[in-house]
Amino acid sequence: MTTKTLGVEKSPVGAVSGGAAWRLAGQGAAALAGGMGIGRFAYTPILPMMHAQAGLSPRLGAALATANYTGYLAGALAAIAVPRLLHSRWALRLSLLILTATLALMPLDRSGPLWLSLRLIAGIASALVFVIAVSAVLPRLHSHHVGWTFGGVGAGIALSGAVLAGGNWRTAWWITAVLTIACTVPAWHLTGSPTPRTAAGKTRSRHFNALLASYTLEGIGYIIAGTFLVAAINETATGAVGNGAWIIVGLAALPSTAIWAWLSRSWSRSTLLLVALVLQAVGIALPTFIHGIAAALISAALFGATFLGVANLAIALGAELDVPHAVAVLTTGYSLGQIIGPLAVGPLLHNGYHQALLVSAGVVALAATAALLVRHQPKELT
């Protein structure tokens, strides 16, 4: 009989080390930078451009976000239905190539149905990139290497934010396509090997159910801010401040997962998850109460420093609980939340974006409450 503490860092069996570990982490980071940081989140800085230059209405903008998140849900469900996708190098490659194509096709027409279809397909591809890349690195890397892998999302956000600042909406989409294909090159040989999972006991299932509820609520709350933060900041500041804030999000996200992984050596992941969610709720709410550059940048820094940390901590906890297909199940809950989020705030957008941020902060606070249930479960599991 073995005893272990929930949420305290443990080395995975058969973990690679040295140069091989950094190479694997780099491949995973490249996949997440292209599939998530650029291919998925570049829509946030492009959204104000499309409002101003392409005649995109707030309602259609929210619908495009919802289409993308619906695709993300479909991709996560596909990974559960067809588990071999999680370990398929060709599924990863094809997903990255399809994602690149959807980005390149966005500027070809101002057709709402075309945009909706492309963002739906992009969501499917992004989800598959995420679950395949995470499934490839999580069983074989120590937590600090996994942290830097998740940092690829932040790198993609910062890179796209810097490159897209103040540009034309058509050019912006083509730039994201080029950046995504550039990330595909180092990610080309990334693949994972199946990792056997045992059935979860009742105590572990209770832990996992609380974790799933928290992570689903986080999906609702974070995606509202992740989609509309720049637009909300631009309502009370210049476009340069909004774009600058998005760059700060990426720069804060880049090292954040490695920092949270380092903290997990001394603190349980369940405790850190609670802390990250509280900080995120505060950061999202801040620009609704305090206007100006300082508040915008602090908000961006708190959001960037936590949203990937929450994902990393939650997925690491889920994998530790030995629930079958934990990564895909958690991603499904997260993506379901992302569909609900934009739909829930859609009726509020005609009054601007600040009310949406308040809703976002409130839901993330609820996610923190659910995380308390994870934290207060018995820590010693057999």
Image (cartoon, helix red, strand yellow):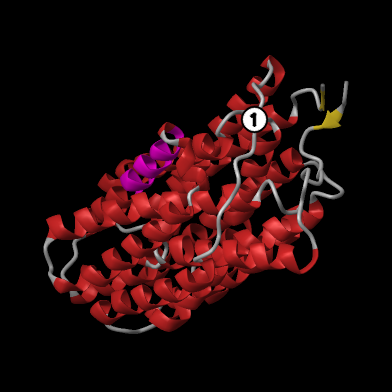
Q: Amino acid at mark 1?
A: Arg
Residue 159 in the figure: left or right of residue 230? right
Measured along the vertical axis of the image, is residue 200 above or below residue 69? above
Measured along the vertical axis of the image, is residue 14 above or below residue 323? below
Q: Is residue 75 magenta?
A: yes
Q: Kindly indicate the quadrant of the structure image that contains residue 268.
A: top right
- The quadrant the N terminus occupies is top right
Between residues 258 and 135, which one lies in front from this camera angle? Answer: 135
Q: Specify few, some or many for label 1: CA neighbours under 10 Å numbering under 14, 14-19, or 20 or more.
A: few
Residue 304 in the figure: left or right of residue 125? right
Q: Kindly indicate the quadrant of the structure image that contains residue 249.
A: bottom right
- Estimate the x, y position of residue 242 in percent, counting from the top left: 43, 74
- Asked whether the viewer can see residue 224, the reply is no
Residue 41 in the figure: left or right of residue 271? left
- Estimate the x, y position of residue 256 in percent, counting from the top left: 67, 62
Question: Magenta region, mostly helix, strand or loop?
Answer: helix
Residue 202 in the figure: left or right of residue 303? right
**Which residue appears at 36% of the width and 69% of the height?**
235
Q: Is residue 367 magenta?
A: no
**Which residue appears at 53% of the width and 37% of the height?**
330
Magenta span of residues = 69-80
Residue placed furthest toward the top: 202
Between residues 220 and 83, which one lies in front from this camera angle? Answer: 83
Residue corresponding to mark 1: 197
- Estimate the x, y position of residue 369 in percent, counting from the top left: 62, 33
